[in-house]
Amino acid sequence: MIAYALVCSVAFVLLLLAEGIEGFGSRACSGGAQEAVWVNPELPDTGVDVHGIGTGKRPYTLRRALGAGDRIIRFTRAGTITLNASIYIQHSNITIDGASAPAPGVTITHTPENYGALIIGSPGRQISDFVLSHLRFQGHWPEVREKWGCSLLNIAVDDHSGGKVSNVVFDHLTMCNMQDKPSIWGNVENVTVSNCFFYQSHKSLLVSAHGKSKDLLRSNISIHHNLFAGSDERNPQVRGWVQNLDFVNNIICSWKKYGMRIKNEPGEKPVNANVVNNVFCSDGRRPDSALIYGWDPGPDYADRAKASDFPQGTVYT
């Protein structure tokens, strides 16, 4: 246990030095206790979960590499991974290092019919220390219209059985052409989303409750130094039972419906957020919808506002 903690601490320090990870997720310890597991992105995804250890001479699919914890996943070459079913990540101490692939890097997508995704979380399990960096996630918007649940990446513990996800880093990711949004919901804490590019999607990012998980607390979420560009909405959306969210030093531009939205339905625990030093550029389209409280600009039932409150767009110091 002491040896593992030491290796984990060293890996954590190296991660900080190499990537400059900041925010609540920076305490994440990467999968440094084991040798690297190698993935060839050109191997077809069977959609069937198999466990094993890949080597440089005999690499595995991403699905097989994610079959256990305590590992750093690297790539033997560039390519596109097409998920034929979702991969449910149920183990701790995993790093997926997309920077290990040569140019042009690794893209993760799914077929237009099955909407496979990487899903971090499992009912009843405590999962922690997951680092995902330098990858491209590409959906099929707008050729394939929105369908609920067709995101490519989620942190999800949507139950009341004691499951929890903590210490997660999403860094230097590209998320484009998403029909539905990457989501953070359920019992989740200590997450950093940094240096990512969200663009040309229907929905960009969601930190939210969903269904019966609405009273499960999402806490300590850092979203910083990201670019949200050319998407319809949810850049991001934050809703209900979110505590200690830092949304700092982001650029949100060229939205079609709205930029960022914070809302609470009746009965939901109010969002506690720190929204500081961000730039909202509407490009002339719906400038009153840069930062919305509730459903729409102006007071409404979902932001618990009174008619006498300051209108949207009011600046006060």
Image (cartoon, rainbow, N blue to C red):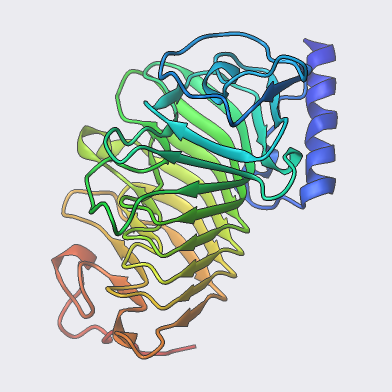
Residue found 40% across the figure and 61% down from its top: 236
Where in the figure is residue 99, as x and y percent of width and height? 73, 43
Determine whether, in the image, residue 166 is placed left or right of residue 113: right
Residue 122, picture quadrant: top left
Image: 133 above or below 86: below
Image: 211 above or below 233: above
Where in the figure is residue 298, as x and y percent of width and height? 21, 80
Determine whether, in the image, residue 276 is placed left or right of residue 302: right
- Judging depth in this view, the residue of 177 and 17 nearest the camera is 177
Where in the figure is residue 67, as x and y percent of width and height? 55, 14
Image: 187 above or below 226: above
Residue 37, picture quadrant: top right
Residue found 21% across the figure and 33% down from its top: 212
Where in the figure is residue 317, as x and y percent of width and height? 49, 88
Determine whether, in the image, residue 269 is placed left or right of residue 69: left
- Judging depth in this view, the residue of 256 and 165 nearest the camera is 256
Residue found 61% across the figure and 64% down from its top: 225
- Judging depth in this view, the residue of 306 and 138 nearest the camera is 138
